[in-house]
Image (cartoon, rainbow, N blue to C red):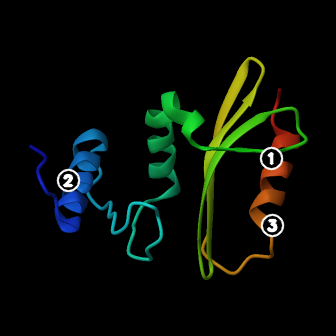
Amino acid sequence: DKESVSFSGAQSYVEKRLEETFSWQAARVEEGAGLSRANRLSAYQIDELLRVLEPYKQTFSQVANTGGATVYAKTGTLENVSNYAGYIEFPGRQYRFVFMFNRDTPYRYRDDMLELLLRQLPQ
């Protein structure tokens, strides 16, 4: 028998799990897809999540690039907010990245920043 869960119940559960897993006191997840201005996670906290989610990185979108790397990433966009986070894999090396822009950015800005990062990272 499946138990019905309300949105607020699910929200409370996620916030409780974040606090238990990471000892985060001020984290707020209003909407799980990241499409709420009420969400409160820092770039450091997103990086911690990426560390834990690493075994599931293939569920992230694979991003095409020219840097010889495989990139798995998720985006989040609201007006004047543009976020990009994920994993960069070179043969034998892996990195995590988090970009958070809380201002208006030009079209493809986060993609350009990723390409710049790919050129700077040791392979």
Q: Picture coordinates of residue 75 (x, y %)?
A: 61, 59
Sequence order check, earlier mark of 3 and 2: 2
Q: Picture coordinates of residue 39 (x, y %)?
A: 39, 68
Task: Classify the position of the C terminus by image quarter.
Answer: top right
Q: Residues within 10 Å of mark 3 (few under 14, many from 20)?
A: few
Q: Which residue is rendered at x = 59% and y = 43% of the image?
A: 60
- Disc 3 and disc 1 in contact, CB within 8 angstroms: no
Between 81 and 44, the one nearer to me in the picture: 81
Q: Amino acid at mark 2?
A: Tyr
Residue 98 visible in the current orientation: no
Numbered circle sitting on residue 99: none
Q: Hey, which residue is sitting farthest top in the picture?
A: 92
Sequence order check, earlier mark of 2 and 1: 2
State how many labels appear: 3
Q: Picture coordinates of residue 66 (x, y %)?
A: 91, 41
Mark 3 lies on residue: 108
Q: Quote the CA–CA distance across marks 3 and 1.
A: 14 Å
Residue 106 visible in the current orientation: yes
Mark 2 lies on residue: 13
Answer above or below: position of 100 versus 37: above
Q: Picture coordinates of residue 108 (x, y %)?
A: 80, 66
Mark 1 lies on residue: 117
Q: Quote the CA–CA distance across marks 2 and 1.
A: 35 Å
Q: Quote the CA–CA distance across marks 3 and 2.
A: 35 Å
Q: Quadrant of residue 40?
A: bottom left
Sequence order check, earlier mark of 3 and 1: 3
